[in-house]
Amino acid sequence: MVCGVRVEDVDDPLMQKIRYLDKLVDELAKGRSMDKVLRA
């Protein structure tokens, strides 16, 4: 969920990718490592 909107509910694939990137940037800004964010 990004900005109160479930990413799965967004119809436009481009908007889905933009929201995923927004979430990734937010998590990295909080200091989390890339591995933890991507659950690798």
Image (cartoon, rainbow, N blue to C red):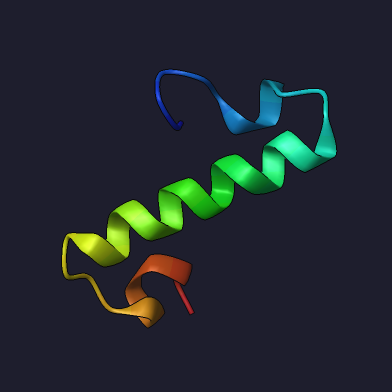
Query: Is 6 situated left or right of 30 in this image?
Result: right
- Dividing the picture into quadrants, the one containing residue 12 is top right
Name the image quarter holding residue 11: top right
For this orientation, the residue located farthest to the left is 31
Total of numbered circles in the picture? 0
Q: In this view, does 20 lie to the left or right of 37?
A: right
| Residue under the point 49% across and 80% down | 40
Query: Could you say which is closer to the camera, residue 31 or residue 8?
Result: 31
**Left or right: residue 31 compared with residue 19:** left
Q: Quadrant of residue 39?
A: bottom left
Residue at the location (28% across, 79% down)? 33
Residue 2's place in the image compared with 37, above or below, is above
> In front here: 12 or 37?
12
On screen, residue 20 above or below 32: above
For image coordinates 68% across by 30% down, the residue present is 8
Q: Horizontally, is 30 left or right of 10 in the view? A: left
- Residue 6 percent location from the top left of the image: 55, 24
The location of residue 32, given as percent across then percent down, is 22, 70
Q: Position of residue 4 (x, y in %)?
A: 41, 18
Residue 35 in picture, x, y percent from top left: 39, 81
Can you say whether 26 is above or below 7 in the image? below
Residue at x 33% of width, y 73% of height = 36
